[in-house]
Amino acid sequence: MPAKNDIIKNTQCFVLDMDGTIYLGDRLFDFTTEFLSTVERCGKEYVFYTNNSSKNADAYISKLKNMGIAVTADKMLISNQVIIQYMLSNYAKKSVYIVGTRYLIDDFKAAGIKVADGRDADMVVLGFDTTLTYEKLCIACDMVRDGKKILGVNPDLNCPTDGGFIPDCGSMAALIESSTGVRPEFFGKPSKHTLEYVKQCTGKREESITFIGDRLYTDIAIAEGTTAHSILVLTGESSLSDVEQGGYHPDAICGSLAEITDILKDIYKL
């Protein structure tokens, strides 16, 4: 396993998870701004990437702006974009029933994908639906039992908040799977679709990309079996005991982004 300092030194682009990594809920971590400025001072790049499909890129750009972080659209990546790109390449003429928020629906419509209101749609897309109703679940399950394809935006089981955790898209998918026996294919981290999308958007070689995040089965798992790297931060969902239980293996572990900032400053004598 490469040394932590070597990974950080050789990284050209850091791919930053958001909730649990740069902020928690609506509270920006006090070390985030310094980390971002230090990355830039070192001549490196960063992009934000969130699996949270309950919002869209514009909403996150606005949220970061309200926190004092100005970010351009090219630096704000989200799982919605990954699945939409796949849909346009593979199912452009299909109509979709979306179990998701208005943000996700609007993203699909803006991309020119036909969104249908019910069972007559050709396929189902499941997102992190904070407006979930029993009726939506019934429609989705009926469609899946009728043999229609279901795709999931992100596999996260829980979303961290200031008050704890709330069920995310992966938990909603588990409910549908329990009812129908069908598990959707997912497109957010850790899917190969997201890795390819990040490479496309950043223009960086795989080995020069490092994913930073707080969740083992998404932020860390995406780099496993690839030449990309991963750094787990302990400011969100996963703990050291989770790592010790095995299953996912970060290339490095840091207490927070503040530790990475200190390493960068030491390497580049800032």
Image: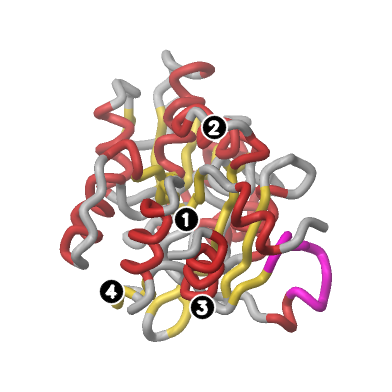
Q: Secondary structure at mark 3?
A: loop
Q: Earlier in the sequence, mark 3 or mark 4?
A: 4
Visible residue check, residue 137: no
Locate residue 33: give its quadrant.
bottom left
Q: Which mark is residue 16?
A: 1
Three-letter code for the amino acid on which mark 3 is drawn: Thr
CA distance for labels 1 and 4 = 17 Å
Q: Magenta segment, principal secondary structure?
A: loop
Residue 160, above or below 176: below
Density class for disc 1 (Cα within 10 Å; few <14, some 14-19, many ≥20) is: many
- Earlier in the chain: of badge 3 and badge 2, it is 2
Three-letter residue code for mark 4: Asp
- Is residue 266 among what the camera can see? yes
Quadrant in which the N terminus is drawn: bottom right
Give the foreground label among 1 and 4.
1
Left or right: 93 in relation to 57: right
Measure how far apart labels 3 and 2 are at the Cα level: 27 Å
